[in-house]
Image (cartoon, rainbow, N blue to C red):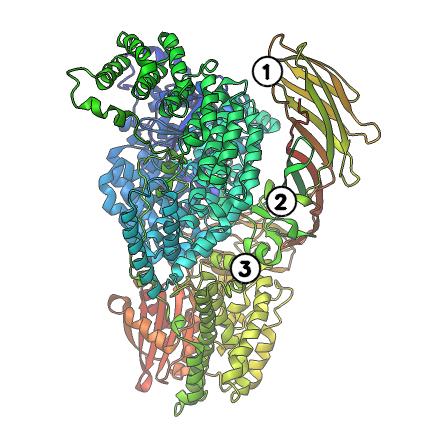
Amino acid sequence: MIHSLFLINHSGDIFLEKHWKSVISRSVCDYFFEVKEKAVDPENVPPVLQTPHHYLISIYRGKLFFLSVVQTEVPPLFVIEFLHRVADTFQDYFGECSEGVIKDNLVTVYELLEEMLDNGFPLATESNVLKEMIRPPNILRSVVNTLTGGSNVGDTLPTGQLSNVPWRRAGVKYTNNEAYFDVVEEIDAILDKSGTTVFAEIQGVVEACVRLTGMPDLTLSFMNPRLLDDMSFHPCVRFKRWESERVLSFIPPDGNFTLMTYHVSSQNLVAIPVYVKQNINFFETGSCGRLDITIGPKQNMGKTVEGLMVTIHMPKVVLSANLTATQGNYTYDLTTKVLVWDIGKLNPQKLPNLRGSLSMQAGAPKPEENPSLNIDLKIQQLAISGLKVSRLDMYGEKYKPFKGVKYLTKAGKFQRLSLSFL
Amino acid sequence: MSASSAFNDEKGGSSSVGEPEYGHDPASGGIFSSDYKRHDDLKEMLDSNKDSLKLEAMKRIVAMIARGKNASDLFPAVVKNVACKNIEVKKLVYVYLVRYAEEQQDLALLSISTFQRGLKDPNQLIRASALRVLSSIRVTIIVPIMMLAIKEAASDMSPYVRKTAAHAIPKLYSLDPEQKDQLIEVIEKLLADKTTLVAGSVVMAFEEVCPERIDLIHKNYRKLCNLLIDVEEWGQVVIINMLTRYARTQFLNPNINESLLEEGGGGEKTFYGSDEDEDEDEEEKEKKAEVAAMAKRKPYVMDPDHRLLLRNTKPLLQSRNAAVVMAVAQLYFHLAPKAEVGVIAKALVRLLRSHSEVQYVVLQNVATMTIKRRGMFEPYLKSFYIRSTDPTQIKVLKLEVLTNLANETNISTILREFQTYIKSMDKDFVAATIQAIGRCATNIGEVRDTCLNGLVQLLSNRDELVVAESVVVIKKLLQMQPEKHSDIIKHMAKLTDNIQVPMARASILWLIGEYCEHVPKIAPDVLRKMAKSFTNEEDIVKLQIINLAAKLYLTNSKQTKLLTQYVLNLAKYDQNYDIRDRARFIRQLIVPTEKSGALSKYAKKLFLALKPAPVLESPFKDRDHFQLGSLSHLLNAKAGGYQELPDWPEAAPDPSVRNVEVPEWTKCSSREKRKEKKVEKPFYSDSEGESGPTESADSESDSASGSESGSGSEESGSGSESEESEEGSESEEEEEEEEEKDKKKKKKELKKPVPETESEQSSEEEDRKIKRKSKQRKSDSESESDEDEESESESSQSESEDSESEIEVKKKKKTAEMKPPSKPVKKETKKEKKEMSLLDLDDFEPAPSPQVTPVNTFLSNSLVTDLEGLSLSDSVLSPATIAPSSVLKNYELLHRITGEGLSVEYCFSRQPFSPDANMVAVQMQFTNSATSDTKNLHMEDVKLQSGMRVKEFPEIELLSAGETAMAVMGIDFCDSTQAANFQLCTHTRKFFVSIQPPVGELMRPIFLTENEFKKEQGQLMGMNEITEKLTLDAKCRNEHAIVQRVTTAANLSRVPCGSDKECRFAGRTVTSSSLVLVTVATKEEGAAQLTVNCEKMVIGTMLVKDILLALTQ
C-alpha cells in the first residue's frame, strides 16, 4: 500500500526517506515540487497527485510535507490518516513535530517508521505499543545511555500487540494514581456585518491524562449527555454502552489520549461570549483609512475571558497602521499584511479599544471590501455548551485514584465579517 | 523478563555463525575505494567487541540511509552483526538488511539462517519478528524458504505470528507472482481464522493477491461482519471496502424501486435534448414500467446477511479514524436502502473539522454524493459555508457542494452567501463562485433573472478577473433566452473597450455575433473597433473577430462588407496558421465567387444555426461509478489495482453459500417443538426400564440439553424475528449485545472454540449460550428436586437464574482479570463440571461464590441416588474423594533436603487457568520446614520446548519458617508431555526443577450427550481409534469404581450412556481442543475393552497406557 515516505521541509529539501518496499528514487518528488511551486501557499497543494507511475499523497504538518508514494489503488484517506498518525507520534515522542527535532532524533524516527508499517500496511500505530518497543527520548536517559551504552529500544517485547486491548500496555505501575480529563470546547462561528450569527457550532473534545496502575476499567458519565449531537470515540470506548446508557465505559490507554470528540450544533444553544464593535473605513481620497474596534463581554457565564486576540488580514494596499490600544499591544506585519492585536484578559469595566489610522499605497484604488476579523479567546473553567461531567467510576482495581476535570472554552474559527459598508 | 532473556540467549549463542571470511570482499578493491576510506571507521566500529561502538556505528549508518545516502558498501560489515546480542543493534541491522538486501543478494543469504532459527523460537514475538524480516528481504532465491515459513506460520498457535504470516503473503506475491496458487491456499486458511488480530491483515493480503476470488469470502462473511468492530482501525478499512464489493455481487439492489423513480425524475434533467429523443424516452418509460411492475410482483426483501453488514458497520461511523468513517460511508452509499443512507451525512460533516487534507478528500466524495442524494446533506448546508481562512482548494470544493445542494427553497440563502464570497480577496475563489452562480441559475429557473442581474452588476467590478469570469458565465446564461436580454448584450458590447482578458473578449464577440439581429446597430460598430485592434489581439479573440465578421456579413452585408474583407485580409497574413486557415475557409464560404459552388448557399445555415445552450454540469457527475473513497474516484481515473465495483446482480446468488456448519445444539429448531417433546415424554420416560444410576444420569443430561437448547433456540428465534422486522427489536437486541460485550472479550481470552452459527446470531449470543449451557447444568441439578413439576417452569426459571448468575459471573470475571493472574479465581461455570475439590483453594478466594455452596448441600442432601452415576458429582458422594490428595495426585517438585528446608509439591488442580485457557493450571504448595524465613520465592530462566508457554506464579515475598503457601502457575504444554524446566529462586538459592504432566492432565472435560458422543466417535475412526483389551482389577469391577479410576487418571467427564455395560468419557485437549473420547466396555468376569478416540494419536496412545494402568492395578 504505502510504498515510501519522504519528509520535505518548507524550502523543498528532502531530509528523510524511508522505503517499505523496493527503493523509489527521490526524483519522484520533482512532480510534487512542480505543483508546490505553482500553488504558492503550501495549504493549496492538492493532497493527491498523479504522476506517470506513482501517486503522491501528502500532508502538510508543522511546516513539513509528509509525502508518501503509492503505486496502486488505496483509499486516499487511509494514507492521509496514517501520515497524520505518524506526525502525531512524532509530536508525542519529541514534544513537537519539526524538522530540527526529527533530524536530531533521526534514528528513533527511523525505528518508529519501521515499526509503524510493515510492507506498507500499518502494523503498530498505538502510542502505548510503540512506547513499549521504542522508548521516547529524554535527557536523563540519553545521558545514562551515553555513559552505559544503553539503548532506546525497549528490551521487552511488545506484548501490547498481542492483547485484546492493544492500546494499553501491560504491567503499568504508578505510585500516584491519577486520572484527569480536560473538556475543551471550541466555538466556530461566523457573524455577519450586523453582528448576527450566520453560523455557530461548538466543537468539543475530551482529552484524558490517565496514569493508573494495572487494568482499570473506567466509566465516565455526564450530567447532560443529550447535549451532544455527534461524536467520535477512541477505540477503547465501548460503543454499545454509550448507545444504551450514554456513559463512556473504557479501559484507558496509558498516558495522554483523546477520549472523544463531540459536536454541539443547534444554533440557539451556542452562546457567543464577546461582542465586537468595529469600524474600518477606507477613504476614497488621501489614501488613508480609519480603524476603530471595541470588544465587550456578552455571554460568558460569569467567567473572565482571557487570551483575547484579534487578527485582521488587511488588504494588500494597506502599507502601515498607526494605532493606539487602550489595552494590550498590536503588531502589523508589513509583508503578510496581518494586523494582530493581543489584548489578554477582558476587563468588563474598561472595554479594550483599538483605534487609529491606516495609511495606504498612494494612488491605489480603495479596497472594495473591508477585511474580516478573526477573534481568539479562552475561558477557563467553563464549557460553553454547558456540558458537565457528573462522575468517574473505576472498576477492576482496588486503589483510589485522584480524579479531576478541567473545562476550557476556546475560540476555534471565530470570524466576524466586516461591518462597514463604504 | 524471561522472554527477553530467552531472546538474548537464543541469538547470543549463534553469533559466530554469520561470520565467514570477508577479507576478499569482491568490491573492496574496486572503484569505490574512496568510499571505503570514508567508511573505514564505521567498519572498525562494527568489528569491535563492544556493543556500544557497534550501536554507534549502526546509528550513523541508519542515519545515512534515512538521509538517502548510499551505505551499501558496508553490507558485509553490517550483515555479520545480524545475530548480535544487543537488541537495538540487531534491530538496526534488520533495518539495514531490508534496505540493501535486494542489491546484495548473495551476501544477504548469509543472514537467512539466523531468521530460520528465529522461526522456531518458543517466543511468539521472536517468531513473528523473524518472519517479518525474512519476508521483507527481497531476494528471489529464498522464495521457497519464505513459502515454507509462511505456511508454517499460518498454522502457528499464536495469532500474532499468523498475523505476521498474513503480512508476509503480499510480500512474497510481489517477489514471485508464480506462487499465487499456493498463497491463495494460505489465504484461504487464514481467512477462516477467528481472531480479530488476523482478520484485517489477511483481508489485506486477499485484496492484494486474489481480489477476484470472491468465493473464498462466502464462508467467512458472517464471521468478518461480527468481528469487524473489534478489528484494529486499518484492518476495518480494508475489510469494509472488500465487503462492499462482496455485497454488490451477492445481494439485490435495495433501491430497486426507488432507483426507477429516480431515473424517472432524471428525465427532467435531460431537459434540453428531450424534444429530439422523445420516442426513445417513451420506450424507456415502457421498459421502466415493465420493470416496476415486475418489482411490484416480487417485493424486495433484504437478505439478512445484507442487513447484518449494514448493522455491524454502522457503529464505526463513530470511529476517530477518518478512513474508517469514510469506508462505512461509502458502504452505506453503495449498499444501503435510500432511506438509511442519511446516517452517514452527520459523520462526514464531522470529518470536515479535521485536517485540511481530510477535508479535501471528504469534500470530493460529498460532492459526488450530493449529485445523487441531495436531500441527505441539505440539513447540513451551513457546515459547507466557506471561511476566509480555508485554503482555496477547500473553498472551491465547498462551493461545488453548495451548488449541488441548491434548490428552490434554499437558493436565496445560498445566493446571499455567494454574494459575500464574491468580495473575497482570493480571486481564484471569486471566479469559482461566479461559475457556481451560473450553475445555480441554469439549474433553478426561478432565480435565473436574479442571478443574471447580479452578474451584470459584477460587470462593473473593478477587478478584471471578476468581470471576465462574469462575462463567460453570462454568455452561457444568455444562450438560454437571448431575446429577453438584448440590453445585457448591449451593455456587454460596451465592455469591449475595457476588458482585456482574452476569454472574456472572445465571449462578448461571440455573443454579439450570435445575436446580431438583437443588436443590429451596435454589432457593426463593435466589428469596426475590433478590426482596428485586430493585430494586437490574442488568438482566441482574433478567431472570434473573424467569426463575428462572417456572421455580420451574412446578415448585414451592406454595412459590413468592407470591414469583413479588411479583417479577412489581416487574418490572411497572420502568424498563426489556425487563423490563416480560418480566414481562408470563411472567405470561400461567404463571399460568392464562381468557384465557390454549392456550399456558399448554405453559409447562413452553417453560421447562424440555432445552437443548443450549454449545460453547466458538475464535474462530479457520474463519478459515482467509481467506488467512493477510492483513489480512482478522487482522480476520476482508474488507478492501478482498482477493483471495479460490480453492478447489482439481477437475481441474488444462492445465499446458502454463506452458511457455516453449525454445532448440533444450536440447530434445535424452536422452543415450541421442544416443549411438545417434553409434554409427550414425561421427564424420565426415555430411560424407563433401565437401571437406576444410568437412568438418572441419562435423563438428567437429556433435560439439561433440552432446556438449554430451548433457551438457545428462543434466543435465535428472537434473533431471526428481529431480522425479519428489521427495525423492530433491533435496539433491544443491541442492548443485549452490549451487555455481552465484556464477557465476549473475556471469552476470547479463553479462546473458546466459538462455533459459527447458522444465521444472524452473533458470536456474542453464542458465547452466551456456551455459558448458559454450563449454567443450565447446574440449574437442572437443582430443579431435579421437584422432578414432577418440571417441563414448563424449568426453562423460565433457569433463564431468570441465568441472568442473575451471569451478572455474578461477570463481576467475578472482572475481578479475576484485574487480579494478578495466578490467583486461582475460578469461574463458577466451570466449577460445576469439576470435582468439588476446592477446599484448598478457599484460602485464595476470600469470598467463595454463593452459588457453589447451596448446590453442594443440595446435591448431598437429596439427590444421592439420582446422581450416583454422574461423574460430575462423583466426588461429592464418596467423602474420601473430597480431599484433594486422593483425586489430585501430588507430585514432588523439590524435596525438603535438596531444597534446604524448602519443599515444594505440585498437583494439577484441573481448574481452568483463568489468565489463559490454553494453559494447564499447576497448583504448587511451598512448605518451609527450615528454621529461617525464605524470601522472594519466584521462578526464573524458564526453558521450554518450542511453542510452550508459562505463566509464572507471582512472587511469594515471604515464607516464614514452618509456614506453607500456595501458588498457581499456568503452563501451556502444547499437548505434549514434554517437561517444563525452570529455576525456582529464593533470596539465597536457585533450584533447577521441572514439571512433567501426565497425559491425562493435558485435557479438560467437556459435556457431550450420548448422541453427540456417538457422532463424534464416528468421525474419529481408523487411525484415530485405539482399542485395547484388558482385565479389570478385582476391586474395580463396578461401574462406580471404573468411573472413579478413569477420571482420576485423566481429566475427563462422564458421558451419559444408555447401557450399563459401557462407560464413556469425553474431554478436549487443553491447547488444541482436540476431542478425546474414552469408552470402557465391560464384559463377563472382569474382561473389558478400552477404546480411545483422539485426533492426536500420540495423546491417544499415551492415554490408553495410563488408563490401562489405572484400571488393571
Contact? badges 1 and 3 (CB < 8 Å): no
Residue under the point 49% across and 24% down: B428
Q: Which residue is mark 3?
A: B738
Residue, far bottom: B689
Q: Which mark is residue A265?
A: 2
Residue flagged by tag 1: what amino acid is it? Answer: Lys
For label 1, the SS is loop
The 10 Å Cα crowd at callout 1, few under 14, some 14 to 19, many 20 or more, is some
Quarter that holds the C terminus of chain B: bottom left
Q: Residue B728 location in percent, x, y?
A: 50, 65
Task: State whether discs 2 and 3 lie on one chain.
Answer: no
Chain of the residue displaying label 3:
B
Query: In the rendered view, does B413 fall on the left or right side of B129?
Result: right
Query: In the rendered view, does B782 fall on the left or right side of B475?
Result: right
* Nearer to the camera, B432 or A397: B432
Contact? badges 1 and 2 (CB < 8 Å): no
For label 3, the SS is helix
Q: Residue B124 location in percent, x, y?
A: 42, 46
Q: Which mark is residue B268?
A: none
Residue flagged by tag 3: what amino acid is it? Answer: Glu
Residue under the point 41% across and 52% down: B948
Chain of the residue displaying label 2:
A
Q: Which residue is mark 1?
A: A316
Q: Residue B809 location in percent, x, y?
A: 57, 65
Residue B649 visible in rendering: no
Residue flagged by tag 2: what amino acid is it? Answer: Ser
Give the Cα separation between the discs numbered 2 and 3.
Answer: 28 Å
Residue under the point 44% across and 39% down: B443
* Nearer to the camera, A299 or A226: A299
Task: State whether discs 1 and 2 lie on one chain.
Answer: yes
